[in-house]
Amino acid sequence: MNAVVQVFAGIAVLVHLLAFTWEVVLFERPGVHRDIFGIPTENLPATRLWSFNVGFYNLFLAAGPITGLILLHTGNVEAGRALVLYCCGFMALAGVALGVSDLLALSRPRGAGRGGALAQTVPPLVALVAALF
């Protein structure tokens, strides 16, 4: 597995770890729930469970490529490669789903989640494309 794949898989991991941190650890800070996610403070009780669940979803997504890279560098090349590529595919598709849901959003201004969708989609997609070479 070439270095470009590994670097962009690592970037994808960092994006998902950042999302976990925002959604679980820092969600109640106004700079996070209001400014990043566009959720008014009065809606925190109604959205906290959602945020917690999505945060752990992102943490578990990040665990896949980390495990795959460890396997890759400890001699289990085929399993490591398969895990990294599968998880990058999953991450890229989840990013596309986030982008589509942003386009269909009716309760907030369109485009509010576009940056997150791009951040979630582009690094794993680059890793997948780089794996072809």
Image: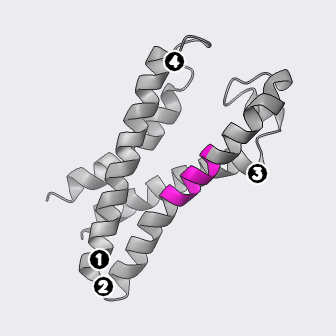
Q: Mark number for residue 76?
A: 2
Asked whether the residues under the numbered discs 4 and 2 touch, taking CB atoms below 8 Å apart as contact, a structural biologist would say no
**Crowdedness near tag 1: few (<14), some (14–19) or many (≥20) residues, C-alpha within 10 Å:** some
Residue that sits furthest to the right in the current view: 42
Q: Which residues are magenta?
A: 54-61
Q: What amino acid does circle 2 point to? A: Asn
Residue at the (52%, 35%) spot, across then down: 116
Q: Is residue 37 above or below residue 15?
A: above
Q: Which residue is mark 1?
A: 79
* Nearer-N-terminus badge (1/4): 1
Q: Nearer the viewer, residue 40 or 5?
A: 40
Specify whether 104 is left or right of 3.
Answer: right
Question: Residue 76 is drawn in which quadrant?
Answer: bottom left
Dot 4: element: loop
**What distance separates the C-alpha of mark 3 from that of mark 2?**
34 Å
**Which amino acid, by three-letter code, is at mark 4?**
Gly
How crowded is the residue under tag 3: few (<14 C-alpha within 10 Å), some, or many (20+)? few
Quick check: 87 left or right of 116? left
